[in-house]
Amino acid sequence: MTFALFMLAILLLTGFIWLLDILLLKKKRTPGAAEPTMVEYAKSFFPVILAVFLIRSFVVEPFKIPSGSMMPTLLVGDFILVNKFTYGLRVPILNNTFIEVSHPKRGEVMVFHFPKDPSLDYIKRVVGLPGDKIEYRNKQIFVNGVPMAQQENGSYDYVGPGLNQISTRRLLENLGTHNHDILIDDSNPVRDVQVTVPQGSYFMMGDNRDNSNDSRFWGFVPEQNVVGKAFFIWMSFDHLGRIGTKIQ
């Protein structure tokens, strides 16, 4: 959100300088005289900044994964693309929807403004939809009393904070129409929850279930905080084989 504000400020500044030149400054210049450097820069940068601002606001926006809370689906350092149109067109900065397209579906990976600090963007998986009764018990999700299917899918080891080696169980989980891998760390205590998702809100969880700061700890994500659907890994410097991967 901070970068969007910065882009909007630069867009308005360059646009104002260009418009001021058209309406006032140009008329006062001697015919054939060179444009002031400031006006020349404004005319050059305004169309580029406008195009980038519109694309980032309404079409697609890049993000970098900062933590391991979505492992193994997303790794630290992955660069992803987020579809800004899937969940409807929103007013830049204010984030109010003015054209509805669809709503988040269970199992989708979603970027949103962190409810406790909207200047931060988080990425988690949609687990609970408005009105759902969500229970997380014995490290398994129950939606409206129905357990979400899990099956063992091997093991997964990774280096955690402090260079600690963490060993987990890898399970294939089904949420809605989405099949994806999750990680379970049996050395961590169970964090059981039982909630009903309010209307206009979503319950989010990370795929790295025992190492994720998500709705189990800070609550629900309001509709107004939704940014978009994560759908594609376009770069991963440490894992080149992941480039071009669709996010499940």
Image (cartoon, rainbow, N blue to C red):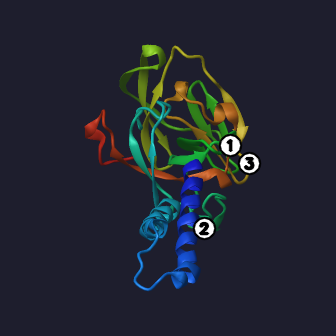
Give how far across and how far down residue 185 sits, in percent.
49, 20
Q: Nearer the viewer, mark 2 or mark 1?
A: 1
Numbered disc 2: secondary structure: loop
Numbered disc 1: secondary structure: loop
Viewer-side residue, 219 vs 237: 237
Q: Circle 1 sits on which residue?
A: 115
Numbered disc 3: secondary structure: loop
Give how far across and how far down residue 7 sits, in percent.
54, 57
Residue lying at 29% horizontally and 35% vertically, measured from the top left: 239
Badge 1: residue crowd in 10 Å (few <14, some 14–19, many ≥20): some
Q: Circle 2 sits on which residue?
A: 100
Q: Earlier in the sequence, mark 2 or mark 3?
A: 2
Residue lying at 59% horizontally and 59% vertically, measured from the top left: 9
Q: Which mark is residue 190?
A: none
Q: Earlier in the sequence, mark 3 or mark 1?
A: 1
How far is disc 2 from disc 3 in space, using C-alphas?
Answer: 20 Å
User: Mark 2 is on which residue type?
Assistant: Glu
- Image position of 15 (left or right of 230): right
Badge 2: residue crowd in 10 Å (few <14, some 14–19, many ≥20): few
User: Mark 3 is on which residue type?
Assistant: Pro
Viewer-side residue, 60 vs 130: 60
